[in-house]
Every structure is written in C-alpha cells, then in structure tokens.
Image (tube, rainbow, N blue to C red):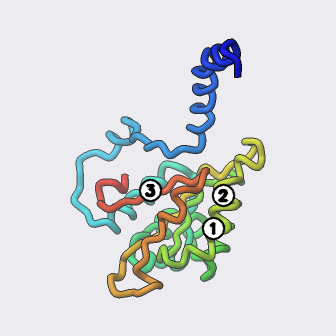
Amino acid sequence: MTSRSLTVALRNAPRLLQHSQRTAAHFTYMPSGVKPEIASAGGPAEKMNLCQAVNSALHIALAADDSALVFGEDVAFGGVFRCSVGLKDKFGEERVFNTPLCEQGIVGFAIGAAVGGSTAIAEVQFSDYIFPAYDQLVNEAAKYRYRSGDMFNCGALTVRATYGAVGHGGLYHSQSPEANFTHTPGLKVSFLPSVSQVF
C-alpha cells in the first residue's frame, strides 16, 4: 500500500467506522430504559411477591392494549405458579386461554399472532421445556424482520418462562437456559431476579 492510499484510507476510516457502528448497533444488546410515563403510571408502591408482580404486569398489559393476548399451558386456570389468576375472568377467554402441551406450537402461534398485529404474551411453564421451541425462537422470531426486509416483524412478542422454580427438579424443572438465546441477533433476553424488575 502506498503512502498516498494509506492516507486516503485513514481519512475515510472514521466515516467507515461510524457506518459499521450504526450497523452493528442493530444487532447489539442495548438496555432498554424505563419510560418516565410508565414508571410514574403505577401509583404508590405495593408490596408483592414475584408471582403477584407478574400477574399485575400482565393485568396492566391486557388493560392497556386491546390486542394483547396471554396464553400457554394452564394459563386460563391461573398457571402452574398462579401468576395468571383472575386474568381470564376479567379479560375473557378470547384473550387469556390455554394451549396444548406443545412449546413449539405455543411459540409458533405467538409469532403468527404478533406478525398479525397482536401483542402476544406466551408462557412456557418451565424454561427447561423451551428447547422444543428453540427453532421457532432463533430461526423464525429472531430473523423475521431481517428476512422480510423489515416489511414484517414480531416485535410485539413476549415469551415468558420460569427458571429455577423447583430447586430439586433436576433437568426438567430447575434449569436456567436463557444464555442459549442471548447471542441471537433479533432476540432480547430479560432475566428478572427480583420483583422490582418485573415492571
């Protein structure tokens, strides 16, 4: 490389670097800040456990968004950990409903609902069972926007899965497999170790 071409390359480097950062940012995790209007909308703080906080968050989501759907195994019955108690009674069985025991089907339906314009909140009872849905999450949900040139997306999709809920559950009720998804462009993984982070 001649000294002249090196000079030109160095002169163009900041512009190229800026462009590559802009492109890379599209695929890089960035923490989402809490919007002030959401942070102040809840009113006075109320003491609650994690399941009560999840129930409250689902209640707020369903009340605020008529297109929101909450579904999964036993969700309409209140859920295995009772996190969805009372939601079907308040919002109806068309918005809060049970699904068959098929995690791949639950997530596949959630993707379709989100692409169709709904806010899909799918529950996988135990995160240990999320692996049958791995293909749906990693190859479909995460890449939907990229494959369609941003014509379609499933950005209104949330998959909620419980981790470590049973301390003696072995490989089917105690795993914490979220790290398997953290390096997938197009997915955001939230790991909530405390009640205060549910909102």
Q: Which residue is tagged 2?
A: 141
For the N terminus, the quadrant is top right
Q: Which residue is tagged 1?
A: 107
* Residue at 25% in and 63% down: 48
Q: Which residue is tagged 3?
A: 190
Foreground mark, 2 or 1?
A: 2
* Residue at 28% in and 45% down: 43
Q: Is the C-beta separation of discs 1 and 3 under 8 Å? A: no
Is any part of residue 160 visible from this angle?
yes
- Earlier-in-chain disc, 1 versus 3: 1
* Residue at 58% in and 64% down: 95
Residue type indicated by callout 2:
Ala
Horizontally, is 2 left or right of 172 in the view?
right
Q: In whole angstroms, how far apart are the C-alphas of marks 2 and 3?
A: 16 Å
* 10 Å crowding of disc 2: few (<14), some (14-19), many (20+): many
Q: In whole angstroms, how far apart are the C-alphas of marks 1 and 3?
A: 17 Å
Residue type indicated by callout 3:
Ser
* 10 Å crowding of disc 3: few (<14), some (14-19), many (20+): few
Residue type indicated by callout 1:
Val
Horizontally, is 132 left or right of 76 in the view?
right
Q: Position of residue 166 (x, y in %)?
A: 35, 82
Observer-nearest of 41 and 16: 16
* 10 Å crowding of disc 1: few (<14), some (14-19), many (20+): many
